[in-house]
Image (cartoon, helix red, strand yellow):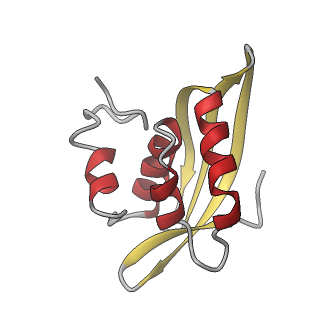
């Protein structure tokens, strides 16, 4: 089975590696992909662990997990990637209705580790 993130690798040799090593990715895009896979797997611990402490929504963790479990994830499409931003579409269906999250995500690297920070200013 290909990884949830859309790479042509297996989950075991792709995002699972990052899920097991606490999010030690080499690039912001790898972290973005691993976070998408964590949404598919409803892995709230990983989502919180890889979300920067300054913007981490700890109080919303259970709601995020519940929502991630309630939708049918379809695919991730990376539109553009820079050193610290990743523009993407995450396709899913909720209550039988197709939907898409379109985001230009901002990442920050601290102590040699990437973290999701939030929306980049230019979120077109």
Does residue 103 appear to the left or right of 3 in the view shown? right
Query: Residue 120 at x, y = what percent?
Result: 70, 65
In the image, residue 119 sits, relative to residue 13, either above or below, namely below
Q: In percent of the image, x 47 and y 66: which residue is there? A: 49
Looking at the image, which is closer to me, 74 or 120?
Answer: 74
What count of labels does the image hold? 0
Picture quarter with the N terminus = top left
Question: Is residue 31 among the parts visible in the rendering?
Answer: yes
| Side of 100 where 69 appears, left or right | left
| Extreme-left residue of the structure | 13
Report if residue 50 is visible in the image: no
Q: In which image quadrant can residue 26 be found? A: bottom left
The location of residue 78, given as percent across then percent down, is 54, 42
Horizontal and vertical percent for residue 63? 69, 48
Question: Is the residue 15 above or below the residue 7 in the image?
Answer: below
**In which image quadrant can residue 79 be found?**
top right
User: In this rendering, would 14 be left or right of 97?
Assistant: left
| Residue 101 or residue 120, whichever sits in front | 101
Q: Where is residue 57 shown, x and y percent of the image? A: 67, 65
- Residue at the far top: name it: 96
Along the line of sight, the residue nearer the viewer: 26 or 66: 66
Which residue lies at the image location 49% right of the left edge and 53% below the top edge? 32
Q: Which residue is depicted at the point 67% across and 73% down?
A: 55
Residue at (70% x, 58% y) in the render: 60
């Amino acid at each position: 089975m290909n990884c949830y993130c859309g790479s042509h690798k297996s989950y075991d040799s792709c995002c699972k590696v990052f899920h097991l090593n606490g999010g030690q990715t080499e690039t912001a895009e790898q972290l973005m992909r691993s976070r998408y896979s964590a949404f598919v797997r409803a892995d709230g611990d990983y989502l919180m662990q890889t979300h920067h402490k300054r913007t981490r929504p700890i109080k919303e963790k259970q709601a995020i997990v519940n929502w991630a479990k309630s939708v049918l994830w379809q695919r991730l499409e990376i539109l553009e990637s820079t050193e610290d931003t990743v523009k993407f579409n995450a396709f899913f269906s909720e209550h039988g209705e197709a939907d898409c999250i379109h985001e230009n995500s901002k990442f920050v690297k601290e102590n040699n580790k990437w973290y999701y920070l939030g929306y980049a200013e230019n979120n077109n």
